[in-house]
Image (tube, grey):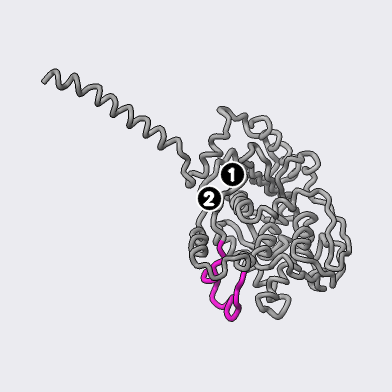
Amino acid sequence: MIEDQKTASPRVVSLIAILLVALLVLFSVQSPDRVGSQAAAALPLRLSPSPTLAAEAYLVRLTPRFFRAAEAPSDEINPHTFPQGILEGVGIKTAANQAGYEGDNSQRQNRSVAGQGAQLPDRMILFSQRAAKRLAPASLTKLMTAAVAAEYLAPDEIIVFSDEAKAVEKRLSSAPAGEVFLRDEAVRLALISSANDAALALADAVGRRLGRVSYRDRIELFVQLMNRTASRWGLANTRFRSPTGLDLADQYTSAEDLSQMAIRLLAHHPELWEMTRQYTETVFSWQRRQYPIQNTNELLTEFPALSGGKTGFTDEAGGALLLLYPVEPDQVAIIVILKSDDRFGDGRKIIKWLEDNF
C-alpha cells in the first residue's frame, strides 16, 4: 500500500503541472470581449498626478485605435427604434444599406446587437472630473451631425446651401446661397471650419431625402435622427436640439457620452476623424469652385501626431474640445474638455501629461 502511494505521487505531480500549463495558456489568450485589457497593458506602472485644468468637466480614456470587424460596436440603423410616424411611408435606406447590407439578413442581425441603447464596454479611464455632468455641447454637436449624414447620404449626394441654411447666425462658410457640394465636401466644411451653414445643409439634405417638404420639418426630422442615434449608442446624458450646437434650451451632453461617441466614430466612421486632422484644406463645390478653409483646432500645428479632434465654443458652453491622441501603435487617448476658460491650454497640458507617462 505504501509502495502504491509512492508510485502514484509522480503521476499526481505531472497532472498538476499539466493543469497549471493549461490554465496559463487559457488566461494568456485575450478574449475579444475584454476590450479594456489592451489599454490596461499599455499603462505604465506609475502615473504622475493628473494636470490641473480650467475645464468644469473632462475625461481622458484609452481605447483601441483600430477595431476588427468582430470587435467593433454595432451601428445598425433600426427603423423599429424610431418614434411611431417619423418614418411612416418612407423607405429608409442608409448609406450602409446601399453598401451591401440591404437584403442580407444574417449581417443585419449580427450588426444590430448593440442597437438598443447599450453602453460600450468600459475602456481604461485615466482621469476625469464631473464626466457625467450635463453641459452645453457647442460645435462638438457637429460630430453627430456628420455621423448621421454619413449614414443617410451617399458620397455622391448633392448638398445645396439654401437661403435658410445661410440665414443662420454665426460662423458661416464663404459659400453663397445656392452653392452645391458633394456630401464629403460639405462634411469637411462642418468639421474642419465648423461652418454652421454646412451642418444645416447636410441636415436639410437628409430630411429632403426622407420625404419632408418644408425646411423646418426636414431639420426637425434630422434632429430626431441625431437623438435616436444617441439613444442607440447609450448616450444617456445627451440631447440635441439642432445640427449646429448653437445655444438652445434643453440641449446638453457630457464628457462621458462624448468619449463613447468618439469610440463609435473610430469604429464605424474613421474617415471623419481623418478629415479633422487637416489644418488647412481646399473644399471644392460641384462646379469646382474652390473654398480654402482653416481648422479651428490650433493644436494641430503644435501636435501633428493628433489623430483628430473637434472644437466648440458658445456663450453657454464656454470652450469645448475633443481630441484623439495616439499613445501606442494600437492605442489612442480620447480627451474630452467641456466648459473651459482655456480649452487649448487644457488640451496642451493633457497631451504633455500623456507624453510624459507613455
Q: Position of residue 350 (x, y in %)?
A: 68, 37
Instruction: Spot the residue most to the right.
Output: 289
Query: Which sits in the foreground, 69 or 231?
Result: 69
Q: Position of residue 114 (x, y in %)?
A: 51, 58
Assess whether residue 239 is covered by the magenta stretch.
no
Give whichever of discs 1 and 2 has the lower sequence position. 1
Q: Which residue is mark 2?
A: 71
Identity of the residue drawn at 52% across and 44% down = 35
Assess whether residue 93 is covered by the magenta stretch.
yes
Confirm or deny contact between disc 1 and disc 2 (CB under 8 A). Answer: yes
**For the residue carrying disc 2, how many other residues have a C-alpha within 10 Å: few (<14), some (14-19), or many (20+)?**
few
Query: Which sits in the foreground, 330 or 145?
Result: 330
Give the vertical position of 174 relative to 163 (above or below): above
Q: Is residue 150 left or right of residue 23?
A: right
Q: Helix, strand, or loop for circle 1?
A: strand
**For the residue carrying disc 1, how many other residues have a C-alpha within 10 Å: few (<14), some (14-19), or many (20+)?**
many
Q: Is residue 154 left or right of residue 123?
A: right
